[in-house]
Image (spheres, helix red, strand yellow):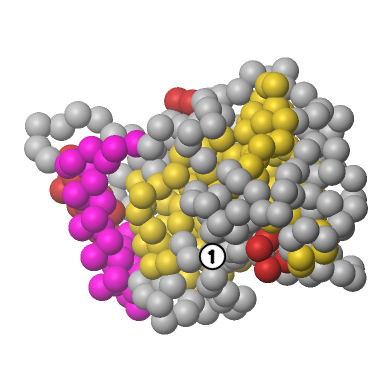
Amino acid sequence: MSDFDWVDIGTIQTSVNWNFTADTGANVFRFLHHNPPARGLLQVAQTDGAVWLFEPRTIASDRDAQILLLDNAVAFGGSRRIGLRYANPSSSYPDWSVSVSAVTVELTPMPLDPGFQLLGQISSEVNALAAQQSQIITQLGVIAQVLSTPTPTPTPTPTPAPSAPSANGQTYTASQSGNYGGVIGTYANLTDGDGSTGAQTGGEMPAYIRASYDQPVIVTAIRVGGGVIPAAGTISSNLNGAHVQYSTDESNWVTVWTVTGVTDSGSSQFITYTLPMPITAQYWQLAEKQYVATTELKLM
């Protein structure tokens, strides 16, 4: 094959949250930027909704186009989606989008370095992108290096049992790293919609407010809340910026949302964040701030 027949699998609007392409079984992907900032980085992930693989390499806005080899892991069972989000959660580039196209390349053992043979196959397609030629050729050198030196694959999240129940109606055990003013959260006072009760940590590190279920549950949305707890004061300043995370083993945590925009009264006192796709996990928490507080931690 002298040229690649790229197939468009979607245009992703960049965001602090994960946004995804359509399902694909391909293994080589081309990323073309539209209205990129001068300096911006995007994280890359692959998921089928249950299993996640987080790519250690990033997509950089100072290159007009990039090509990555992303193996389709056996754990995906045939297809998955490619996701992008800001590497820095404080970034905001509303005009930046990325078109993603894909092709499947059969990689077979060769007597010579397979990286350079694949590089030769790709070269004719690269030359057609005249305005982007120098940037893409630089990236092809990265592909050659990846193919000649195997890239460690991150351990995927174990695939949960398909019989996991919805978080709706399932109670959890609340725990926290410490407390301020004796303010301790329980399942009851973290799911009652009351802006005067909840949980507040005491400044210890690492700080967390955690929900532990008896078994993995399917979560599609998370609700948090501000307000005023008499023994702790206003809550939103210790809630905004906290990371919502999940774990399957209570040791390794994955961030799915950074809380922002919560107030202590009014229409944004309680905010519900809908996940891009359902996630099954047994443990959930608010963490990664010196002080963490919330009047609501409801998983749905």
Indicate the quadrant where residue 11 lies.
Answer: bottom right
Residue range in magenta is 125-153
Above or below, 188 against 181 in this view is above
Judge by depth and name the residue closer to the eye, 177 or 213: 177
Residue 184 lies, in percent from the top left, at: 73, 44
Indicate the secondary structure of the residue bearing disc 1: loop
Outermost residue, left side = 112
Dot 1 crowding, Cα within 10 Å, few <14, some 14–19, many 20+: few
Residue 54 lies, in percent from the top left, at: 44, 44
Q: Quadrant of the C terminus?
A: top right
Q: Is residue 1 magenta?
A: no
Judge by depth and name the residue closer to the eye, 182 or 206: 182
Q: Is residue 101 visible?
A: no
Q: Is residue 134 magenta?
A: yes
User: Pointer 1: what residue?
Assistant: 89
Judge by depth and name the residue closer to the eye, 299 or 99: 299
Residue 269 lies, in percent from the top left, at: 84, 64
Q: Residue at x 68, y 61 (%)?
A: 239
Q: Residue at x 58, y 44 (%)?
A: 177
